[in-house]
Amino acid sequence: MNDAVDNIAALEACIGKTPGAIHLKVIDHLDAGALRWIASSTLVFAGCGGGDDSDGNVAVTLGGGEPGFARAMDPARLRLPLASLDRPQLLRAGSGFGALFLSPGIGETLRVNGRVVLVDDTDIEIAVDECYVHCAKALLRSHFWSAAPRDDAPPDATAFLAASRFVALATMDAQGRCDLSPKGDPAGAMIRLREGCVWYADRPGNRRADSFRNILAQPRIAAVALIPGSSQVAVLSGTARITSDANLRADFSVEGKTPSLATCVEQLTLDIYPSPALARARLWPVAARAADIDPAAMLVAHVKGNKTRGLRATLVRTALSVPGLMEKGLQSDYKNNLY
């Protein structure tokens, strides 16, 4: 593969360094806003890997149910019922854990990372290390919440992926810390199956570049691809490699914008099946949005609650004290920087 991106220097030459202020939005616990979000959520994408008995792989599954199916025991602990998960056997005590919580009608997603500390007869318990709000670009690009229910998803893998508009990508770093990243695009531009490999493109997001950094450290990935409106999902895993090849990137152009990078997943396994969790979540047609969840206000609260100190952190917090500044910034970014 031409123009392979296989180290941090090559990665940052393509996408730039992660701005230090980006890390200020991460807190190490579930605050009041996150607790409300989880209580309103009907669907979670859950990834894990890197436990003491791990084979070095990362895995992903879905969990779903009525609002409140996932329970925060306290700001440091989260519980998921085994019965809410499509494949609960994938989550093992000691494994790194990453979650992506969706709340009906809200474009942003809540990312929660930590480690599985307990698996009993009914629940999986997670010790929380990170919590933050992810921008709405993936769900906006995929027109996620405007989908109508459908039962005509293609049974063929190539056609299914071509019709997919949303992907939850699970990656893991060298220490076994797991992360779930949302990706969204129009059908045909999201993810493709070619000659036994899966390809997907990079788009503007939260600029942390966790997935890329994890792939460079540990290239095994797992992902769930779905067609909004359908309860069928494609779950895949394999070994990822990143390229800046111009021809490959140009093939994923949307609205005249070419992505900075493309990723190939080799040694592929892929399974298409009806997801009971997604069916239970009943995402489409979209339910009323929770009135007490304000992603912009949560972002401000997380920046203020982050424990980082120093001049830069103080300046950012001071700027965010201006009423409405975060909301205006988000809306401008979503309008002008989707691609």
Image (spheres, rainbow, N blue to C red):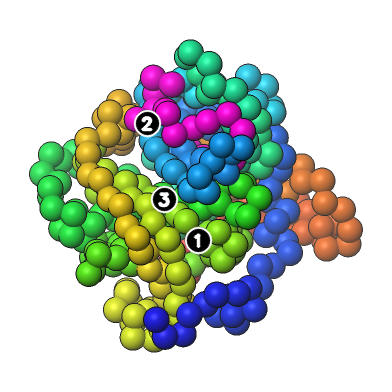
Looking at the rendering, the stretch of residues picked out in magenta corresponds to 82-103
Say what secondary structure mark 3 lies in.
strand
Q: Position of residue 72 (x, y in %)?
A: 59, 23
7 or 180: nearer the viewer = 7
The quarter of the rendered structure image containing the N terminus is: bottom left
Distance from the alpha carbon under mark 3 to that under mark 2? 13 Å
Mark-to-mark CA distance, 1 and 3? 10 Å
Give the labeled residue for mark 2: 87
Image quadrant assignment for residue 313: bottom right
Left or right: 255, with 330 as reference point: left
Q: Please tell me which of labels 1 and 2 falls first in the chain.
A: 2
Q: Is residue 144 left or right of residue 312?
A: left
Q: Which residue is mark 3?
A: 222
Residue depicted at x 73% and y 49%? 303
Q: Secondary structure at mark 1?
A: loop
Residue 25 horizontal side relative to residue 46, left or right: right
In the rendered structure, does residue 217 fall within the stretch colored magenta?
Answer: no
Q: Which residue is mark 1?
A: 219
